[in-house]
Image (cartoon, helix red, strand yellow):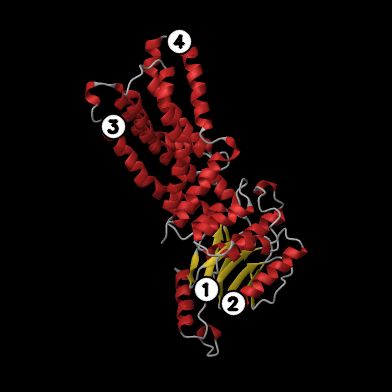
Amino acid sequence: MSANARDKAALAGAAEPANPADMSLQTPSLLAGKSLGMIRGERVLFREVSVAVSAGDALLLRGANGAGKTTLLRILAGLTRPEAGGVTRGAPHHWIGHREGLKPQETPREHLKLWHQAWGSSADTDSVLARMGLSRPSDVAGRHLSAGQRRRTALARLLLEDRPVWLLDEPYTALDADGGTLVDTLIADHRARGGAVIAAIHGEAGFAASATVTL
Amino acid sequence: MSAAPILAAFRQSLGEAWAGGAGALLPLGFLGGAAVLVPLSIGSDGETLQAVGPGIIWVALALASLVTLERIFQSDAEDGTLDLWLQAGAPVSAIAAARTMAHWLSAGLPLALFSPLLALMFQAEASAALFVNAGLYALGSLAFFFWGAVGAALSATVRRGGLLISLIALPLYVPTAIFGALAMSGDPGSAGAPLFLAASTLFACAVAPYAMAAALRLAAD
């Protein structure tokens, strides 16, 4: 009951912004989560967390291991149902989870062809592979790829289709220095085009965040 | 909504079913093994073999469905593919049905198509009825695969979920097994049995995808 009452209060507050200079009035948010709360087992993972991104934003999720960064990202993606609060999606999103989504027998080329077909994408898979530095291992099965190469394959999905929101769970994991720079470039290009990024990152982020949420 | 994600899911499952060199060979190997063991264990009397032959093919189809389906959704949940399919913009039930159909095409249908040959190994008389039976096996095995996939979806996040799949799916196999066996018995009262078999398969195809979708959403939650 009390959680519901809080939600209603939060929503009422959103309808009449206290701050007239609120940027969200000019640029409609691409993705917003309001008063999100989550319980895992017997423990309250987080409560009253609100996030919103508009064009050009990069939101960083910070927190210790087990603080609920991944869970919050899954809630924003619609994979997990929050215990309290709600998510409003104004635009399609890309999901890069900590599991790559690459089958053991699947090669990077096959992986991109598959999602190219599924999404009806118009991007050229060969140039996407080249951009991600995957030209050489493009025909190597997933189980023989290195962790970094699998990561690059997952990140390559971002280039298959232009979607305004990117949800990234630890995008730098397993990547070498080149790979990290590549991720930074992709994010910068995406933001320049009017996209938004929400990323859970543990170490140093190679880009300037517009906001940080600490769980 | 476009059908592209559903076709892509179907294609990925076909590739997966044939990866590792299994595919249709696995269930055929199953039945080949059974066909060798049955005469050794119940005697090589022609009449006995004729009597048990159709039933053994039904059992092989049921086992083939359980064996091939064990990993379909479990591997998706482990490698993150499930998360991607849940966000692919197509109904999850349609994607789950496409994956199930792909596995049926690579394991259930070949077994049904080879059944006339296998029936001959069980001393059946060569006649057109063997091809009618092949159609009945194909129809019935479709129900086996759809119910088995519900069990697979429910146990997607359970390690060594094979036993769980059997416990969930085997009771649902009962109508198919009853009507399938009745349709091949040649009893005077069995004329309507193929229709009941078809009805039980249609029911499975209509209901199972929604059960799978709900189970898969729960697995990702």
Tell if the residue under mark 4 belongs to the same chain as the one under mark 1: no
Q: Are marks 4 and 1 in contact (CB under 8 Å)?
A: no
Q: Is residue B181 left or right of residue B109?
A: left
Disc 3 from disc 2: Cα separation: 60 Å
Please determine whether, in this image, residue A111 is positioned above or below residue B14.
below
The kind of residue on which mark 1 rests is Ala
Which label belongs to residue B160?
none
The total number of labels drawn is: 4
The kind of residue on which mark 3 rests is Pro
Q: Does residue B87 appear in the picture of this structure?
A: no
Q: Nearer the viewer, mark 1 or mark 3?
A: 3
Tell if the residue under mark 4 belongs to the same chain as the one under mark 3: yes
Q: Are marks 4 and 2 in contact (CB under 8 Å)?
A: no
Q: Nearer the viewer, mark 4 or mark 2?
A: 2
> Circle 3 is placed at which residue position?
B194
Which residue is more in the foreground, A63 or B195? B195
Q: Secondary structure at mark 2?
A: loop
Disc 4 from disc 2: Cα separation: 76 Å
> Circle 2 is placed at which residue position?
A193
Q: How many residues crowd around disc 4 within 10 Å: few (fewer than 14), some, or many (20 or more)? A: few
Q: Are marks 1 and 2 in contact (CB under 8 Å)?
A: no
In the displayed image of the protein, which residue is found farthest to the bottom?
A20
Name the subunit of mark 3. B
> Circle 4 is placed at which residue position?
B43
Tell if the residue under mark 3 belongs to the same chain as the one under mark 2: no
